[in-house]
Amino acid sequence: MTTKRHKKILLILLCLFVANLANAQIPTVTKVDPPSWWAKHTISPVRLLVRGTNLNGAKVSSLNSELRVSTVSVNEKGTYAFVDVEISPSLSPGKYPLVLANRGGSTMIPFGLEPPLNARNNFQGITTDDVIYLIMTDRFADGDPSNNAPKDAPPEANDRNNPRSFHGGDLRGVINRLPYLKDLGVTAIWLTPWYDNWNGVNRCDKPWCPNTYYHGYHAIDYYAVEDRFGDLATLRELVQKAHSLGIKVIQDQVANHVGARHPWVTDPPLPTWFHGTLANHQLNKFQNSALLSPHANPLDVRNTLDGWFSDDLPDMNQEEPEVARYEIQNALWWVGVTGIDGIRQDTIQYMPRFFIRDLSNALHRQYPKLWMVGEVFERDAAQTAFFIGGHTGWDSIDTKLDSVFDFALWNASLLAFTNRASMRLLPHQLKYDALYPDASKLTVLANNHDTMRFMSLEGASLERAMMHVAFVLSVRGIPQLYAGEEIAMQGREDPDNRRDFPSEAFNSEGRTTEEQKRMFAWTREWIRLRREHAAFRTGRLIDLYADDETYVFARQLPTDTVIVAFNRAAKEKRIEIPASSLGLANNVLFRSGSLHALVTHGELSLTLPAQSAVALE
Ligand SMILES: [Ca+2]
Ligand SMILES: [Ca+2]
Ligand SMILES: [Ca+2]
């Protein structure tokens, strides 16, 4: 075997020598996507995108007979080769470099097989049993100051005084703070994108300059970890340590666009790789209704799907099959190498619905429990419902998407709990659950890194913020919190809503203000209630009472009923609910701390404290 392999290498070197004599240009390889794959994978062959120079006429071969390799195509400039690799099911994990040769010579393509991770404690998916916690990695915790100044970065790229610079937060910081998250009780963390982004600083004479891509939404490499956040080994360590504490991990993926500094932008693998070019493209006008309406003008649909999110976010063309295939493999690769449990897919509605379906199907085929939530940032439930999976739209497509964020209910909750709308808005909004095949699949955000923090809204107060988070943690669906809300942080529009998490507040003695203490204890308590009562997680939601200041609902299972009551008024309120609506007998007792409510004469009488939420068990 070894001799055979040596002979082959010798032959290649000889070819290289002869080719040099003939003065042909030697091929070089600078990158291969994906760098590794798995035996017995649902995607076989896997298609590699090989970047390099002088690749024209390349033929790729393997030194191992258990890898069957064929060159599919090389682009006109000879800078990219598409290569199919079929992996024998019996081949063990390890390094299996491939040989690329043409008239100019030959070179190696690094490639390997990964050991498969155990599916019992990886790829677990997200359910209503979970509470998701959004972390903006750069702004959470700096666990490794040594990565704050990469060699190619100007010093001002890392500047805590500039809200648009990197601030030093990283994966090690998240690992260090896992005990804090465990104590709070959250069961899943969603990290903003960890793809490698450009290390430099954008300069302009606008108010948003100088700025950096600290947020991670401008990928320059879909297969690399941001060097300021750590490396792949640290990421794997994070996922495994989180799993060992019962905390799942959700990756923020961005298939719709890459950063303008991505090498593809000046040298795309195919002319059809992007919608347009840096010099010549449409800007998205965000006529999002066009994506829902069966009657939309096709030009508006094309603009919303193909237009660039901004001039520095080149829009990927998923209607090019090579792009769709690349992105699907990329999504699977991250799941496979890290063991993550879910994906949050950015700006999902700006991609064709068939692609959302194909991506969802590919993920489920390989990882049946894996979960993906799509960002359809719309306050209209008709639009978010159109994108969730489980039903077929007028276009005959079921996206198979596991979840969407419930921006409509989030919006209603902010309005109701800041006294800008009647509390009746909450049941009014919830009636649109009729649009969903299963509303319990919705992800109910309390806030996120694109929205103002509750405490900075007009009409906000601590009590109101507390009612809002209690609502998110008790209503149907999967709750999602945003780091810092549990200590009542303030923050107006982006980037003010992305202030650094105060590191002292990770410890209870460091939470010194009344607001921090009360909000933390409150959030933790509602997460505990949710954990201890299945009715909060899977019970049917039943409206019991609503007026301008009050909303009361039950979450009911055959074996367990909880009543959740919100009274935003400045004084306590007594209400009566017919017990028959819940099928409750006389003398059933509900409790919440010192608050007791007894069913008597077929009625449940509740005295609701002022400006508060109570859960009666
Ligand atoms: Ca750091
Ligand atoms: Ca970087
Ligand atoms: Ca698009």
Image (spheres, helix red, strand yellow):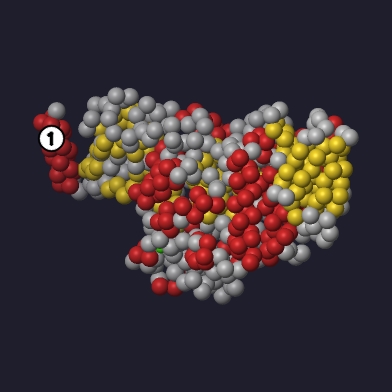
- Say which residue appears at 56% left-offset and 57% top-offset: 483
| Amino acid residing under circle 1 | His
Which residue is label 1 attached to?
Answer: 6
Judging depth in this view, the residue of 334 and 602 nearest the camera is 602
Judging depth in this view, the residue of 450 and 220 nearest the camera is 450
Q: Quadrant of residue 467?
A: bottom right
Q: Does residue 393 appear in the picture of this structure?
A: no
Point out residue 555 in the picture as x, y percentages from the top left corner.
72, 37
Is 85 situated left or right of 310 in this image?
left
Q: Residues within 10 Å of mark 1 (few under 14, many from 20)?
A: few
- Say which residue appears at 27% left-offset and 30% top-offset: 92
- Say which residue appears at 50% left-offset and 62% top-offset: 507
Point out residue 490 in the picture as x, y percentages from the top left corner.
63, 66
Point out residue 163 in the picture as x, y percentages from the top left corner.
54, 69
Q: Quadrant of the N terminus?
A: top left
Point out residue 129 in the picture as x, y percentages from the top left corner.
59, 38
- Say which residue appears at 37% left-offset and 26% top-offset: 40
Q: Compared to 58, does 506 lie above or below?
A: below
